[in-house]
């Protein structure tokens, strides 16, 4: 196979680090660009690591002129709904304006394949569930709006400059890879599953249930969880498609099965054996009630087949990672003491 080089922007983050690992195992050359604002250097699995930001135009030019890059995968974005409602400009600057810099650098250096981490948040409150790619897009928060704006920019760059892109609209990423070496670590943590596991590990007193009056069977929000390794596999298929000169496309990535917040907590109780106290709280601004994917398109067109579909698997792997990460954290504290 011809040697291919992929630039992974945001490769030290949760999903990006899993992606770098899969690319390296697939014998791709990998260059990671990450400013470590939310990523972790020690979670980066290998290949060349460059610490820096998308806004650094000189650095982008250096990277693109120093070697031939076959494709770019872009994971470097802020992704917290509530934060985006409170600080929209932070989201438009980092998620939209910085992506424009990256695309501009790719155009200058004639790099024409791009895989984009998009999100179910582009749809807003769905009028039909499960949500297919042709569902209208009407984001309820600046995070979703910033991602939708990038998708629009990609379509325009395809027309104007022949950029070929695949945009993957993730539903809720969860879990950790089988090796136990990689997993989810955010500071501060805001995501449901890692927060529940912190309660099970005794690091927090309780989990807040954000909103109990949603129009769902148990009143709590419903989300479609997808294992991070299945997400990475979908990116490999997208990369293959672009390397085989397929056309630009947008795909949903989810399992087409929704779980309410209460159901997620119950499964975690079962897996961890901890009672995980839950406190009913106010809804979080910008949260749609139900997000469940119809992902038939990527299954049919690219042959995507998730391996870890059930939520028990995802929580089990996240729990294993959480316990290992705690041990590593304790070791590091011991050594520095
Ligand atoms: N959620 C919750 N308590 C928390 C964190 C999240 O009830 O402490 C809810 C949140 O309102 C949403 C779901 O869990 O309905 C998933 O949230 P998460 O932040 O994990 O992912 P998002 O859907 O925002 O991408």
Image: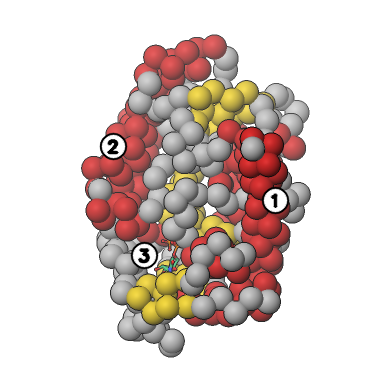
Q: Locate residue 61, reporting x and y percent.
A: 43, 15
Q: Foreground mark, 3 or 1?
A: 1
Is 95 left or right of 251, judged from the image as shown? left
Q: Position of residue 300 (x, y in %)?
A: 60, 59
Residue that mark 1 sits on: 327
Image side of residue 333 versus residue 286, left or right: right
Q: Is mark 1 within 8 Å of ligand 1?
A: no
* Mark 2 or 1, closer to the camera: 1
Q: CA distance from mark 2 to mark 3?
A: 27 Å
Alpha-carbon distance for marks 3 and 1?
A: 44 Å
Q: Is residue 234 visible?
A: no
Whichever of callouts 2 and 3 sits on the residue coming sooner in the sequence is 2
Rendered-image quadrant of the C terminus: top right
Please state which of the two labelled residues, at mark 2 or mark 3, is closer to the viewer: 2
Q: Is mark 3 within 8 Å of ligand 1?
A: no
Dividing the image into four quarters, tell me where ligand 1 lies.
Answer: bottom left
Within 10 angstroms of label 3, few (less than 14), some, or many (20 or more) residues?
some
Toward which corner of the image does residue 103 lie, by quadrant?
Answer: top left
User: Crowding near pointer 1: few (<14 within 10 Å), some, many (20+)?
Assistant: few
The residue wearing badge 3 is: 135
Residue at (47, 78) in percent of width and height: 278
Question: Which residue is found at the position 50% from the left and 49% from the top?
Answer: 186
Residue visible at 71% across and 25% down in the picture? 2
| Quadrant where the image shows the N terminus | top right
What residue is shown with label 2?
A: 93
Cα separation, mark 2 vs mark 1, equals: 37 Å
Q: Is residue 162 left or right of residue 241?
A: left
């Amino acid at each position: 196979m011809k040697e291919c080089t992929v630039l992974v922007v945001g490769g030290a983050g949760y999903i990006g680090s899993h992606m770098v690992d899969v690319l390296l195992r697939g014998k791709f050359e990998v260059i990671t660009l990450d400013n470590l604002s939310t990523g972790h250097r020690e979670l980066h699995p290998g290949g060349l690591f460059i610490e820096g930001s998308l806004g650094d135009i000189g650095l982008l030019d250096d990277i693109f002129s120093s070697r031939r890059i076959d494709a770019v995968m872009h994971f470097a974005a802020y992704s917290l709904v509530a934060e985006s409602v409170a600080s929209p400009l932070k989201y438009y600057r980092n998620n939209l304006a910085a992506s424009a810099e990256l695309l501009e650098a790719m155009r200058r250096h004639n790099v024409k394949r791009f895989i984009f981490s998009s999100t179910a948040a582009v749809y807003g409150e769905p009028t039909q569930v499960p949500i297919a790619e042709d569902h209208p897009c009407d984001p309820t928060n600046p995070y979703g709006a910033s991602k939708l704006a990038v998708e629009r920019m990609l379509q325009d760059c395809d027309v104007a400059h022949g950029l070929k892109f695949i945009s993957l609209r993730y539903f809720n990423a969860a879990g950790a890879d089988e090796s136990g070496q990689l997993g989810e670590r955010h500071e501060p943590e805001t995501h449901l599953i890692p927060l529940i596991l912190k309660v099970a590990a005794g690091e927090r007193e309780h989990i807040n249930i954000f909103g109990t009056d949603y129009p769902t069977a148990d009143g709590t929000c419903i989300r479609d969880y997808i294992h991070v390794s299945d997400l990475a596999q979908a990116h490999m298929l997208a990369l293959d498609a672009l390397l085989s000169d397929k056309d630009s496309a947008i795909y949903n990535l989810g399992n087409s099965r929704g779980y309410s917040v209460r159901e997620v907590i119950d499964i975690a109780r079962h897996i961890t054996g901890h009672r995980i106290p839950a406190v009913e709280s106010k809804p979080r601004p910008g949260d749609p009630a139900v997000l469940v994917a119809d992902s038939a398109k990527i299954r049919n067109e690219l042959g995507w087949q998730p391996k870890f579909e059930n939520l028990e698997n995802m929580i089990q792997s996240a729990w294993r990672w959480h316990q290992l990460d705690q041990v590593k954290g304790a070791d590091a504290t011991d050594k520095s003491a």
